[in-house]
Amino acid sequence: MSRAIACFAPELVSAPDGLPVTLDEAKAYCRNGADDDHLVEAALGAAVASVDGPSGGLGRCLMPQTWRQSFNGFAKCLPLPFPAIGLVEVAYVAEDGEAKTVDLSTVRLIDASGMPHVIRLGGVAWPATRSDGGPAVSVTFVAGFPDAVPAPIKQAILLDVRRAYGVFKADAELKKEVVEGVGSREWDVAGSLDSKIGDLIERLLAPYRRIEF
């Protein structure tokens, strides 16, 4: 018999081996100077974080990485927080407090790239778990694109990095600088060009944004 379950915050078990865009790729795209690699690196980290993982704008992971989703018990379906490419383990705490695992041949990952969830096969009931309201069941899974991160996402990240790098270098807060005896200079980093870049980034990312139901 199924029951309503509570989901806890997903936990990162194993981070990806790298970023979808390398630092060298980002540096080349920004055409930065040798003394400001740290600016490109900071911009790259921020750009990836804005689209990757549970807090990213795409609602999915990019590079393969391992996550654990915990529940306070079993139910007919165990929903995962974002698209998955494979199961690692389904574990639970039995009524007697002993930690156990479920044979993965008896479960299946359904709708892996959409609204992923885990079910038990063959109409077999899930085992009984402790019922104190704390985490009693956990699904460990791999998330991310199974092959390479799509080129439009990488291009969007590069555009975001270059935009941020330009702000770092130009000082976006400075609208007008006056030097006595020399004259003045004026610019607007956050003007129409920035808006156009933002629109382009949005168009590149839109096909990969996961729709929440």
Image (cartoon, rainbow, N blue to C red):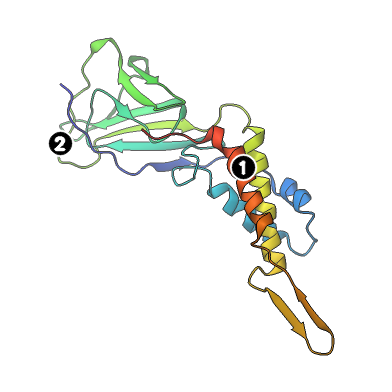
> How many C-alpha atoms fall within 10 Å of the one at disc 1: few (<14), some, or many (≥20)?
few
Specify which label sits upstream in the sequence, 2 or 1: 1
Q: CA distance from mark 2 to mark 1?
A: 39 Å
From the image, tell me which residue sits under label 2: 131
Can residue 38 be seen here? The reply is no
Q: Is residue 126 left or right of residue 181?
A: left
The residue sitting at 19% across, 32% down in the picture is 4
Picture coordinates of residue 192, whole percent (x, y): 66, 57
Q: Can you say which quadrant of the picture contains the C terminus?
A: top left
State left or right for residue 3 relative to residue 90. Answer: left
Q: Residue at x 74, y 45 (%)?
A: 25
Left or right: 66, with 166 as reference point? left
Is residue 66 visible in the rendered image? The answer is yes
Q: Residue furthest bottom?
A: 181
Is residue 150 positioned above or below 170 on the image? above
Residue 18: numbered disc: 1
Left or right for 44, reference 68: right
Q: Which of the two residues, 59 or 198, is positioned nearer the viewer here?
A: 198
Seen from this angle, which residue lies furthest front?
192
